[in-house]
Structure formats: C-alpha cells, structure tokens
Image (cartoon, grey):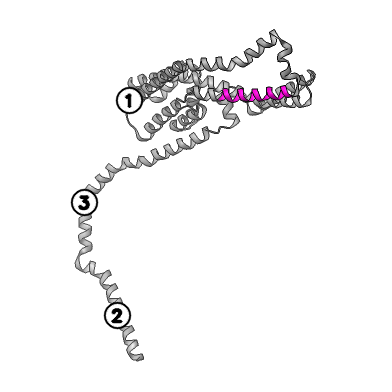
Amino acid sequence: MPDIDALAIIGLAVICAGGLAYALIYPFLSGAVKADERREAVAGPAVRATRKVQEPAAKRPSVEETLKEMERRQTNANRPSLSMRIAQAGLSLSKGRFMALSGLLGIAAFGLTLMAGLGLLWALAAAVAASVGVPQWFLAFMKKRRLAAFLEELANAVDVIVRGVKAGLPLGDCLRIVATEAQEPVRSEFRYIIEQTALGIPLHEAVLKLYERMPVPEANFFCIVISIQQKAGGNLAEGLANLSKVLRDRKKMKNKIIAMSQEAKASAAIIASLPPGVMIFVYLSTPQYISLMWTTEMGRFLLAGCLLWMFIGAMVMRKMINFDF
C-alpha cells in the first residue's frame, strides 16, 4: 500500500510538471507569441489613435473634482467664520478690532443702564444685547445690503466679459476691465480675484472664492461657468451669455415677487401696529384705565403674555409674506 501511494504521488507530480511546461513552453513552440507581436505591430497605430481620442476624457476627473470643491465651499459658506462675515459685510475691520468694539459697546450699555437706575439685572441684559445682538444684527444688515448691490450689478459685469471675449480679449483682461469700471461691490470683488491670480493662484481657484465672499446662487453660477470652462474648455462667451440671461430673468422674477407681496406686507404691518396703537390712544385719553397693565401684578403678567402672543403672531405673518427666490 505505501508503494502504491508513492507511485500515485509521483504520477500526480509528473502530470503537474507536464501541465506547467505545456502552459509555459507551448506558446513559443506554436508561434502564438510571434502572432501576438505581429498583431500588436499592425494594430499599434489604431490603438494610439484611440488613445488620442480618449485623452479628453482625462479632463473629466478634474471637472468632477472642481464640482466637489464647489460643494465643499458651499457647505463652508453656510457656516462662515466671524472674519468671513466681516468680509461679506464689506467692513475693513479685523476680527480683534470688531470684538473690541463689541465689548466697548456692551460696557457703554451697561454703564448707561446703571446710570438710568434700572438695576443690575437690566444692566447685564443691556450689556449682552449691545455686545452680542447689536453687532451681529449690524453685520447681517450690512451683508444683506451689500449682496443686494452685488446682484444689481453682476449681470452688467457678465455682459462686459461676454463682449470682451467675443472681441478676442483674454478672460483675465476682461476681469480687469470689470475690476476697474464696474460699480461697487462688484468692482472690489473682481479686484480681489485679480489680486489672487497675481499671487500665482490659478484663475479657477480664485473665482471659486467669490462664492465664499458673496454667498448667493448667482455668484455660484458664475463660479461654475468659469471653473468648468477653465478645466474642460468650451465656448465661454456663449456660456456667460446664457448666464447673463438667467441672472436678468431671476432679477425680474424677484422684482415681480416683491411687487405681488407688498399688499400682504402692508396688511401685516397694519395688523401688527393696531394693538400698540390702541394702547397709546387709550393711555392718552384715560391713563388711569390702561395704567393697571403695568402697575399691578396681574396686569404685568397679562402684558407679558400679550407681548409674547404679539411676537408669535408677527413671526407667523413674516413667514407667510416672505418668499425664497
């Protein structure tokens, strides 16, 4: 039995060795290797031509990376830092100076409230409101006004670039014209793009920063058109001309929505002003009648409840008459 096992093992080893030798040596003996080399030599030019045709597809990953970068910047634009919010408001203040001014405003409000004799609790509330609430409201107000001015001028700036590109000017020269001739804040934002490119930053990366400083969909559209054209090529004049048309159509729609909502806004303002107006007239006619609202404990409780309900009603009306566009 051991002899039979040994013979079986030897036989299997011989069969495996023969199979490996056949797989490795037979292509050379049969001429298959030479046939493959001949086919490769004949098909070489066609393969090279096919590769040249497929080379533009190599640009697709760069375009995809650009779109991913835009998505990342959009996410960051939704939660900007304090420095970015100051830049969006168009203020030439550093982060430290802004915080110092906010602190001084809070200290002034605290001192004035104490001097008015309203107590420590009211003084602390006034200090917090003046050092946190007022500066943040001011930044939001300045940002909103600056974004509105930017949207008002952006379509004209895009038209200038379209005419320059059609006339044969490079894109960089067209951006310089806008940075020189356009109205604020478009002029300063395009000047910032030119300064970034002068420092060696590629144009498509410098343009992508526009959306961070001007977080509006129209600026994002402009960044997409410029960045994709820089990566994949194409007719820039046609793309920007279509963008200009889109910007002007969006502006028309915005103005139409504002005009249609004015009636509702006027009605909401009248309704919201009626309770305090009636209270003022009652106080002027019979002060002893309405003064119970703040001279008695129950009156103060009812007054606080009325103010809360008035605030909720004003917020509901504001939500009903404001439209996102």
Magenta region's main secondary structure? helix
Taking 235 as reference, is 13 above or below it? below
Instruction: Residue 74: give x, y in percent of width and height.
Output: 48, 34
Q: Residues within 10 Å of mark 1 (few under 14, many from 20)?
A: few
**Residue 290 or 209: which is nearer the viewer?**
290
Name the mark on residue 215.
none
Residue located beneath label 3 in the image: 43
- Residue 113 in sight in this render: yes
Looking at numbered disc 2 in the image, what kind of residue is underneath it?
Val
**Residue at (52%, 35%) from the top-left corner?**
76
Asked which secondary structure carries label 1, the reply is: helix
Looking at numbered disc 1 in the image, what kind of residue is underneath it?
Glu
Asked which secondary structure carries label 3, the reply is: helix
In-image side of 253 versus 134 (left or right): left
- Number of the front mark, 2 or 1: 1
In-image side of 304 versus 226 (left or right): right
Q: How many marks?
A: 3
Lower sequence index among marks 2 and 1? 2
Instruction: Residue 5: give x, y in percent of width and height.
Output: 34, 87
Residue 169 part of the magenta segment? no
Q: CA distance from mark 3 to mark 2?
A: 40 Å
Residue 313 part of the magenta segment? yes
Residue located beneath label 1 in the image: 238
In the image, farthest residue toward the front: 289
Q: Which residues are magenta?
A: 298-315
